[in-house]
Image (cartoon, rainbow, N blue to C red):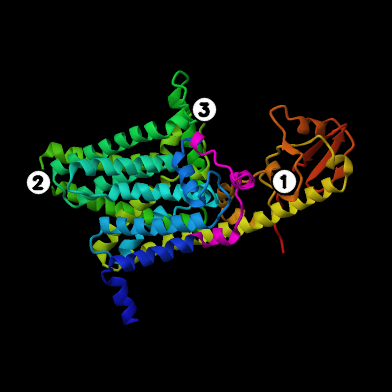
Amino acid sequence: MGRLSDFLGKELGPRQVWLFFLLATLLYVVPLILADFPYIDDNWRSLSAGMAWAEQGRLFTQLFYNLLTFGNAAPNIFPLPLLIATLAMASALTRLTFHYFPQPTIACCLVPLPLWYNPFFLQNLSYQYDGPAMALSLVAVIYAITFRHPSRSRQWLVPALLIALALGLYQISLNVFLGLCCLELLRGVNDRVAWPQLCGLIGWKLAQVTLGWLIYCASAVAFMSQDRALLLNWAAAPLLQLHVNIGRVLEKVVLLFHGGFAWVFAALLLCAIAGAIQVGLQVRARPDSGLKKGLIGLLCLLTLPAVTLLVSGVALFFRDFNEGARTLMGFAVLLVLLFYLSHLALAQIHERLPLLLVLPLLAMLSLSFAYGRVLTVQKAFSTSALFSLEHDIAAHRQLREAKRIYMSVTYSDHWLLAAAGSFKQMPVLHYLLNIDFFMLAENLPKVGITNVVAEKEHRNATRVGYLGYPALVERQYYRIYLLGDYGFIVMKEPAPIKALRW
């Protein structure tokens, strides 16, 4: 017991810190590796070994897979890319820990870990193709924050190149960089960095992010399709659009704070408030003039709303607003901010108390394993649906030989009955899963059915279902109709999930 106590309180070396993060990061992704579930876009990418990232402004993601596969296509090599990204993340978190704490202990290592243990980041990591690239964009951002060099030109250029790399892997990672810049400001104030150095810090970060954006625009934006770069319509109440987008994000974020999670994060928030008061006392004790103290205090106060806004951040300003969990990478920085302030408050009371930060991390790890089980259930359901459709089409010559079979697009929250209990106890799981369809047409070529396509904007399959034609095939979740040389798969609206009883 004494040895354990000594280990928890002793200073760790770089190798020990890296091993800690390697174990912690691998543990978080184990459920996703075990589930091995091709997630949405993975289906068409694996069938065609497709790329198509450059037109999304993610040129470096495309180059990443060119490098890994030694070719111009992207065959599915999961989980190799995820393992590479996890190793890189362990190194990045090690660097960030020594950046924050020159003499780190185990408790210090807990502070930056939410960058990986972000609950909403589970959706990013669900993509077997895109997930590793998104993780590497996070790695690039961390190295951009921690880079230090006596040469002024390198101190300006290298972080800018890393920011451009991060944007070329996944644009939303810009939110993480800006959020970590806010945390840098708070750290500088708490460490009593002089006023000129604080001003220099802000100037350097603004210069780095501006140059990084320009490099990204010069390298990747030229390949991007025009509709991906459309911003809000500034002639049509842009503030109202922003308000609506923020409201939609808030509705999703509150799904996380349910049951025990609400109590854990409430305690974390209280500790963070105590830490913020401690930073405020540091501002008050500074030898600067009253005006400078007021400006520093104002900047510190503005960091919290800024980091909160950066939960979705730049995504709020695009016309094609996406409220999916994968765009909430900035939530990780909000967690790191709360962890950092809580560490300040708890360490002030006793050096071992910051170890309590392991509790919210365990809650997030528990969520990861629960999500992994949901993915496994979804995989079983999808496989069953796929073989059912394959059997019904292969059993009828008219359907096998049909010129085309149109599949209706029917969305519902009630397809996955087997996960009803998990969704009830952890509502955020359904948001993370983000699968509200029965089957994708892209899945059917896996079983040799190549004449099925999703209906387009005319919704021809859906309309056939309403016209009262007799069904050729009747199943629990769908009907198949045949009209001349064309087939139509029409999904039945599933019944709401009833309360489970034993």
Q: Quadrant of residue 404?
A: top right
Name which of mark 3 and mark 2 comes first in the sequence: 3
CA separation, marks 3 and 1?
Answer: 29 Å
Q: Which element is circle 1 on?
A: helix
**What percent of the width, then of the height, locates residue 438?**
71, 45
Res. 227 mark: 3
For label 1, count other residues whose C-alpha is less than 10 Å away and answer few (under 14), some (14-19) or many (20+): some
Range covered by the magenta-colored residues: 29-55
Residue at the image position 48 percent from the left and 53 percent from the top: 119
Res. 445 mark: 1
The amino acid pointed to by label 1 is: Pro
Compare residues 338 and 109 and report the one nearer the observer: 109
Q: Where 58 falls versus 280 (above or below)?
A: above
Q: Which element is circle 2 on?
A: loop
Res. 287 mark: 2
For label 3, count other residues whose C-alpha is less than 10 Å away and answer few (under 14), some (14-19) or many (20+): few
On whether residue 12 falls in the magenta region, the answer is no
The answer to whether one can see residue 308 in this image is: no
Q: Classify residue 302 as left or right of residue 61.
A: left
